[in-house]
Amino acid sequence: MHASSLQISPVMVDLQAGQNAAGIRLRNPGDQPLYGQVRVFRWDQTGDDDVLEPTEEVVASPPLIRIPSRGEQLVRLIRRDAADISAEHSYRVLVDEIPSPESATTNGVTIRLRYSVPVFVEPPGQPGALQLAWSIQRDAQGWLLRVSNRGSRRGQLSAVQLVTADGKLHPINRGLLGYALAGKTRQWRIALEEGIALQAPLKIRANINAQPAEAELSVDPQR
């Protein structure tokens, strides 16, 4: 059985205004060489999904890697257009572990494991504002938590809890829930216990960009 040991640092990349390149370091602490391909995608969101589209705005160099046992590889992320932007741009770097050339199949590339690193390119000036609106809704399949980011900076959401009017805490997600990108709306299916009273006032507690926060939660009509 193949066991991956690829280590990636950092796990998120922020390119500030005027910074046209950054690097991610890939380390192989294993006993065998590791082969991979590195690609960059523009990252968008539509409702339930994260959408990745091929892009040449940011490129990875080198795009193909071979990391020897206990070795390292620096991959540079380069902005091809250094012009200032007016809003935060979001990307994902996908690092795919692939078999060695000697064992590769003739039917295309076989991906063993995939790693995804978020990359953000910032506009000039102060960090953009984060403005999140939270709502919850029930449909035939269950509960949906919707987050609309009306601000100009992404929100990383983790350790999300629902706070009901009686002050009780109801965990929604103990780890990373996901991201609400700038100017986008993202929703997730969540599990809530039966009989929970969703009466105002309702609140959400969460870590947003690693900082604890609390916000009002609205209940939308059923679909």
Image: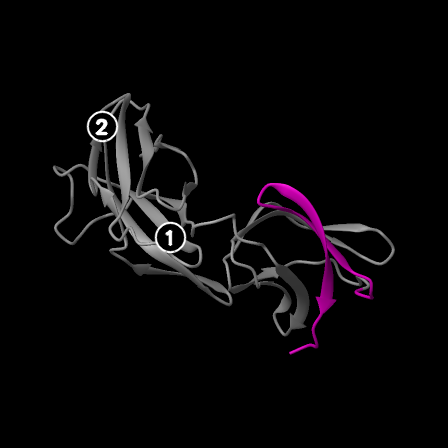
Which residue does the numbered mark 2 point to in the structure image?
Answer: 33
Give the side of residue 97 with respect to residue 199, left or right: left
Label 2, secondary structure: give it: loop
SS at mark 1 in the image: strand
Reply above or below: 133 against 57.
below
Q: Any magenta on residue 214?
A: yes
Q: Which residue is mark 1?
A: 91
Q: Nearer the viewer, mark 2 or mark 1?
A: 1
Q: Quadrant of residue 42?
A: bottom left
Q: Position of residue 111 (x, y in %)?
A: 27, 46
Sequence-wise first label, 2 or 1: 2
Residue 102 drawn at (x, y percent):
12, 37
Q: Quadrant of the C terminus?
A: bottom right
Question: What kind of residue is marked 1?
Answer: Tyr
| Residue 58 image point, x, y percent | 28, 50
**Residue 93 image offset from top left, x and y in percent:** 34, 47
Question: CA gap, disc 2 to disc 1?
Answer: 28 Å
- Residue at image point 85% right, 58% down: 165
Q: Which residues are magenta?
A: 198-223
Q: Residue furthest front?
A: 125
Q: Nearer the viewer, residue 8 or 59?
A: 59
Looking at the figure, which quarter contains the N terminus?
Answer: top left
Dot 2 amino acid type: Pro
The image shows residue 208, relative to residue 67, as above or below, that is: below
